[in-house]
Image: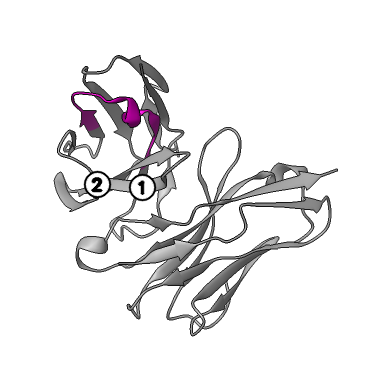
Amino acid sequence: KAGVTQTPRYLIKTRGQQVTLSCSPISGHRSVSWYQQTPGQGLQFLFEYFSETQRNKGNFPGRFSGRQFSNSRSEMNVSTLELGDSALYLCASSLVSRVEQYFGPGTRLTVT
Amino acid sequence: AQTVTQSQPEMSVQEAETVTLSCTYDTSENNYYLFWYKQPPSRQMILVIRQEAYKQQNATENRFSVNFQKAAKSFSLKISDSQLGDTAMYFCAFMNPSGTSYGKLTFGQGTILTVHP
């Protein structure tokens, strides 16, 4: 069974631009969670989607948003990029139980 | 709010030896899950082991085992017969599977483990 995939793997954007990251969960998984990983703040929870609905949200500004499609694929969007948004963005998928999460390889976003 | 603390920023061990990584957590919940994840230099987070709080028996997965002390809110990971491929950052994580906490892992700061030949 294929693992979690994330595209693109690397991205360079300029301040003020917006970006969309994509995550395809493991087949059969209906929950997708997103995390931001930075050297200073560590791993922080962004949000979780289950059955196309956002069920949980972390403490991030409204510039960070996401959605989930009927096939469980998820996208996250960051608008008006700031230098501090440079990070590794990880998504993780899980079954209906939403407990055990399996991570993708991440998208490395650099904002210049 | 739950917090997870890993007090060892870095550790090292010789190949074939045993090493223990520490983790403490704080929660007022009675039902929760604890995990150890491994993140090698390739950055892919890999689930190593999980423990349900209601289970008294410590989880074991091959060379990896945990020492779960619920009253002390302690959850350490023991790696036996360390291998070079165990070199990675290890994260302790917590989840309270209820209400709006579903789907949210709270991570510790991580411990960098280096296995020396």
Q: Is residue A32 visible?
A: no
In the picture, the quarter occupied by the N terminus of chain A is top left
Pinpoint the chain carrying mark 1. A
Comparing labels 2 and 1, the label whose residue is closer to the camera: 1
Label 1 environment density (alpha carbons within 10 Å; few <14, some 14–19, many ≥20): many
Residue at the spot of label 1: A44
Q: Are marks 2 and 1 in contact (CB under 8 Å)?
A: no
Between residues B17 and B28, which one lies in front from this camera angle? B28
Instruction: Tell me which corner region of the image, top left, top right, bottom left or bottom right, holds residue A40.
Output: top left
User: Horizontally, is A26 left or right of B87 in the view?
Assistant: left
Q: Which circle marks residue A47 in the picture?
A: 2
Give the x, y percent position of residue A15: 26, 18
The correct choice, above or below, for A39 with respect to A17 in the image is: below
The answer to whether B56 is drawn above or below residue B35 in the figure is below
Residue B46 shows which numbered tag?
none
Element type at mark 1: strand
Q: Which residues are magenta?
A: A76-91
Colouring used for the render: one colour
Front-most of B31 and B72?
A: B72
Q: Secondary structure at mark 2?
A: strand
